[in-house]
Amino acid sequence: MVIRAIRGAIQLDVDEREHLLKLTAELLAKMLHSNNLHTDQLVSILFTATPDITSEFPALAARELGLGDVPLLCFVEMNVKGALPRVVRVMINAEVDTPRSEIQHVYLRGAAALRLDIAQ
């Protein structure tokens, strides 16, 4: 087993607590499913949110999905002029046998524009 980093992002329509939690949970579920991950494989999950997201911590969505025993940490994304607004980014660190080239990174909704080369 090796530790692999799995990236994902989703763009919110609005900065509202329930919307943030719903879309972050959608992103996490898709990332876990696409990579056949089980919770015992998770090492940690890092979240970033653009500075215009202030309604809630994205990590709460992971706790509500039952991932409360996984170390979770939230950060504010750099405030770069012209950057895509209302984006939650996720990096899951997991123990897997999957080769790096087969890891499925997940970019949903408007965040697909961030990585058109790998967006699903």
Image: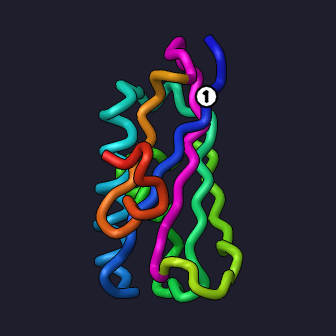
Whether residue 60 is situated above or below residue 77 in the rendered picture: above
Q: Is residue 89 magenta?
A: yes
Q: Is residue 15 left or right of residue 88?
A: left
Q: Residue at left 61%, top 84%?
A: 51
Residue 20, percent across and down?
Answer: 37, 74
Element class at badge 1: strand
Residue 71, compared with residue 113, is above or below; it is: above
Name the foreground residue: 87 vs 64: 87
Residue drawn at the location 37% of the way across and 59% of the way down: 112
Q: Residues within 10 Å of mark 1 (few under 14, many from 20)?
A: some
Instruction: Give 18 or 47, whichever is nearer the viewer.
Output: 47
Residue pictured at 61% horizontal, 28% vertical: 4
Residue type at mark 1 is Arg
Identify the residue position indicated by label 1 in the image.
4
> Which of the two residues, 84 or 4, is positioned nearer the viewer here?
84
Rendering colour mode: rainbow
User: Horizontally, is 48 left or right of 10 in the view?
Assistant: right
Which segment is the magenta one?
85-100
63 sits left or right of 25 in the view: right
Q: Quadrant of residue 86?
A: bottom left
Which secondary structure is most common in the magenta stretch? strand
Question: For this rendering, which residue is in front, 96 or 21?
Answer: 96
Q: Is residue 2 magenta?
A: no
Quarter holding the N terminus? top right
What x and y, as percent, mark residue 11?
Answer: 38, 71
Coordinates of residue 45 in the picture (x, y in percent): 58, 47
* Horizontal and vertical percent position of residue 46: 62, 53
Please tell me which residue is depicted at 60% across the width and 66% down the height of the picture. 48
